Amino acid sequence: MSATKKLFVKTYGCQMNVYDSQRMQDVLAPLGYQPVDDAAGADMVILNTCHIREKAAEKVFSDLGRIRKHKKAKEANGTDKMIVAVAGCVAQAEGAELMRREPMVDMVFGPQTYHRLPEMVARANRAIGRDRIIDTDFPAEEKFDHLPQQVSRQGYSAFLAIQEGCDKFCTFCVVPYTRGAEYSRPGMDVVNEARQLVGKGTREITLLGQNVNAYHGEASNGGEWTLGRLLRELSEIDGLDRIRYTTSHPRDVDGDLIAAHRDLPKLMPFLHLPIQAGSDRVLQAMNRKHDGASYREIVAKLKDACPDLALSSDFIVGFPGESDKDFEDTMQMVRDITFIQAFSFKYSPRPGTPASAMELQVPEPVKTERIMRLQALLAEQQLEFNRNCLGREMDVLLERYGKLEGQLVGKSPYMQPVHVSGLPESSLGQIVRLKITEALPNSLGGELVDAPVQNRDSERKIA
Ligand code: SAH
Ligand code: SF4
Ligand code: F3S
C-alpha cells in the first residue's frame, strides 16, 4: 500500500450520491487515500454534486470558492498538491463549463466514470506538468463490473445501488441526462454485496435506484428478476433484518412488488412513492405516465396487501401552467391519501429540460404561497401520524448516540427517528422494542418494553 493520503469527499443530493461517494472511497483506498472530514490540508477533494434544482447546483460554486483557499494554502510551499475534483450530476451536465470557469479544478467526472479514478488520479499527480481531466462519458463498459468487488464496512443501515439511470423523461427532470439510460445490476451481484454488508455488521439495507422498481436484473438462471423477486432473494439472507427500496415510480409498481409487501416481513411497511402533483393536466404536462386515479389505485392495492403500509412522497408546486385549481387538486390528493412524510419543492427550471421552455411559468410569489400551504398540510399529517404512535410498541434499530447524555437514537419501521434513554451503549446495532411515549413533529421518544428482540447474532457489531 502506498503512503497515506487524505481524501475529503463532500456529498450533495440524493442517496445514490451517498452510495457513489462511498464507492469512490473504495476505489481510492488501494491508492492510499483515507477519508478525512476537513478539506483543509487534504491531498484530494471530491465534490460529489447534484443538479436537480438550481439551488443545489449553485451551492457547488460557492463551495469551490472555499476550496480554492485551502488549495492555495496547501500548495504555498510549491511541493504539496491538492487535487480538486468535481463529480456527480453537475459535473455530467456542466463539465466543460466548469473547467472553463474554475481553473483550479483538476478533474471533472460524471456518475458513470468514477471506476476510472485510479487512472485519472495518476494523470493528475504526474510530477511534471499537470493534466486537467474531464471524463463525462457514458462508457460501454459497466461501471459496476469495474468497481472493487469488496465493499467497505458501513453502518447498521446501508445503501446498496441496484439500478441506475432513468428512461422516464419527466419534463422537469435532469436525471435522464445526468445519469443516462436505465441499467439494472445482475441479481447475484446485488445478493453478494448485501451478504458482504451483513457480514460486516449491517442489519438494514436500502436498495437504491433512480427508478428502483424498474429493476430488471439478470437472474441467477439467466432469466430476469423483478424487484419483487430480488426482494424475496434478499429476504433469505440471515442477519439482514430490514429491507427498504427507493425511489419508486408509480408506473412500475407491479404484482410481484405488491406481493412482496404482502409476504415479506423484512420489507418495511414504508414506501416513498413520488406523485409530484394531484392534477391530471399537470401530471400529463410533466410526462409522469400516471394520473391521479392510477396513483390512488396503486396505493389501494399496496395497502390491501400490507395494511400497515404508510407512504411518503415528492411534490413539485408551480410547474408551468399550474392553475389555482390544479394546485387545489394536489391539496385534495394529499388529504385523501395522507402521507406520513414528504419532500416538496418549488418548480425549478433546469437547462435542457422541456418544461424549462414551456410558457406560463408560475411567478415566484405564487409558488411560495402554494408551497407554504402544501407544507403546512403535510406537516400536519406527519404530526398526526407521529401522535398516533403514542402508546404503540415499535421495533427500533438503534444506530447512534443522541444529543443528551445516555441517549441512543434509532429508526422505527417508518423511518421516524426514535430516542431512548438508559440503555447501555452495547445496544447500538440492536433492534429493540420500544413503547412510544413522546411524539414530536420529526421524531419520537420511547421506553424499553422488553429485552432486545430479533438479535440473531448479537456479536455482530460495528466499531
Ligand atoms: N428518481 C426520483 C427523483 C429524483 S429527483 C423519482 O423519480 O422519483 C427527487 C425529486 O426532486 C423529484 O421527485 C421531484 O419532486 C424533485 N424535482 C426533480 N426535478 C425538479 C425540478 N426541476 N424542480 C423542482 N423539483 C424537482
Ligand atoms: Fe426524474 Fe421522472 Fe426519472 Fe424520476 S422518473 S428520475 S422524476 S425523469
Ligand atoms: Fe441530484 Fe443527480 Fe441525485 S441530480 S438528486 S445527485 S441523481
Image (cartoon, helix red, strand yellow):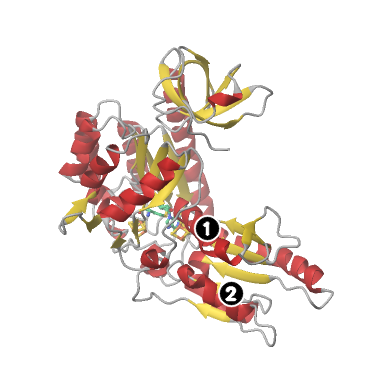
Please say whether residue 338 is visible from this viewpoint. Answer: yes
**Closer to us: 372 or 114:** 114
The residue that appears at 62% across and 29% down in the rendered structure is 402
Rendered image quadrant of residue 121? bottom right
> Relative to 249, is 124 on the left or the right?
right
- Which amino acid type is marked by label 1? Ser
View extreme (right): residue: 77
- Which amino acid type is marked by label 2? Val
View extreme (bottom): residue: 129
Per the image, label 2 sits on a secondary structure element best described as helix
Indicate the quadrant of ligand 1 in the picture.
bottom left
Per the image, label 1 sits on a secondary structure element best described as helix
Which one is earlier in the sequence, the residue at label 1 or at label 2? 1
> Relative to 125, is 414 on the left or the right?
left
Is the residue 308 above or below the residue 252 in the image?
above
Relative image position of residue 203 (x, y in whole percent)? 42, 36
Relative image position of residue 454 (x, y in whole percent)? 39, 24
Is the residue 76 above or below the residue 167 in the image?
below
For ligand 3, tell me if the residue under mark 1 lies within 8 Å: no
Marks counted in the figure total 2
- Tell me the distance, in whole angstroms, between the alpha carbons under discs 1 and 2: 16 Å
- Residue ID for mark 1: 21
**Closer to us: 155 or 463:** 463
Relative image position of residue 21 (x, y in whole percent)? 52, 58
Is the residue 130 above or below the residue 455 in the image?
below
Observer-side mark, 1 or 2, equals 2
> Relative to 432, is 248 on the left or the right?
left
Residue 121, label in figure: 2
Is the residue 121 above or below the residue 350 in the image?
below
